[in-house]
Amino acid sequence: MAKGSDFYFRPRKELYTGSTVAGRFVFPKLTRPDKKFKKEHGEYQVSLDLEGQEAADLAKLIEENFESEYNICRQSKRKTKLKKFDLPFSAALDKDKEEIPGVTRFRFKKRGGGIDSSTGEAYVTKLPIFGAAGETKKITEPIWGGTIGRINFTISPWFTDALGFGVTLELNAVQILSLVTAGEREASDYGFGDESGDYEDDAPSVDENSEDGDDSSETGLGEEEGGVEF
């Protein structure tokens, strides 16, 4: 079967694979694929917020790999120039869509399954989740944004005639260092600050575990001691 002009393939062993430093998970969907936009097989996804030099180092790594892979793709297509798609990171935004000063948000994702080209059978992809000591972690409770963890990923290039050349930060595995679940979020996560100097609070506290959680979803590599890489 002839391949169309959109077809582009790079051997996985030739692509960059590595792990991030610890950062804050945003909108994690990691224990099961999200099917909101990928109806058939779903998609695992999570964004990672980093600051300062750690954010700058990861951004530089992605940019360098983007340019290197762009040139390989361009040469394989025998083109002098290709359209470039957006990089998979940007300034982090708060709930009001305002930039969070000094914070960069990196976006990772992985297909939740597919069709085996040799057998025609559907398959489901599992995402490995590890705890701080490197143990396999079985998550039963919802994992919320605000969880602290690391991500193992591959910089995976792609090309289409419509969108041009781009790269995806493909999720391989996640490591949870500090898990946030229902009832564990901070006031700032809801946009509340310290107002204790202005008002008296006479109301009794409510058991947080009796409230329904919000829609923030799920998350999750070697033992984590002071930024160990693997």
Image: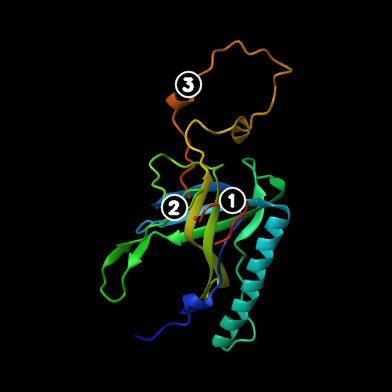
Q: Could you tell me which residue is drawn at 46 percent across and 44 percent down?
A: 217
Q: Nearer the viewer, residue 139 or 131?
A: 131
Q: Is residue 65 left or right of residue 159?
A: right
Res 66 → quadrant: bottom right
Looking at the picture, the colour scheme in use is: rainbow
Q: Is residue 170 left or right of residue 111?
A: right
Secondary structure beneath dot 3 equals loop
Q: Which mark is in front, 3 or 2?
A: 2
Q: Could you tell me which residue is drawn at 47 percent across and 48 percent down?
A: 131
Q: Which residue, given by chain and number where applicable, does mark 3 sit on?
A: 207
Residue 153 pos. (x, y %): 52, 63
The correct choice, above or below, for 106 with respect to 199 in the image is below
Res 19 → quadrant: bottom right
Name the quadrant of the C terminus: bottom right
Task: Kindly identify the amino acid type of the residue bearing the numbered disc 3.
Answer: Asp
Examine the rendering and report whether any part of residue 77 can be seen: no
Residue 120 pos. (x, y %): 26, 72
Q: Which residue, given by chain and number where applicable, does mark 1 sit on?
A: 225
Q: Could you tell me which residue is drawn at 28 percent across and 65 percent down?
A: 122
Which disc number belongs to residue 129? Answer: 2
Examine the rendering and report whether any part of residue 158 can be seen: yes
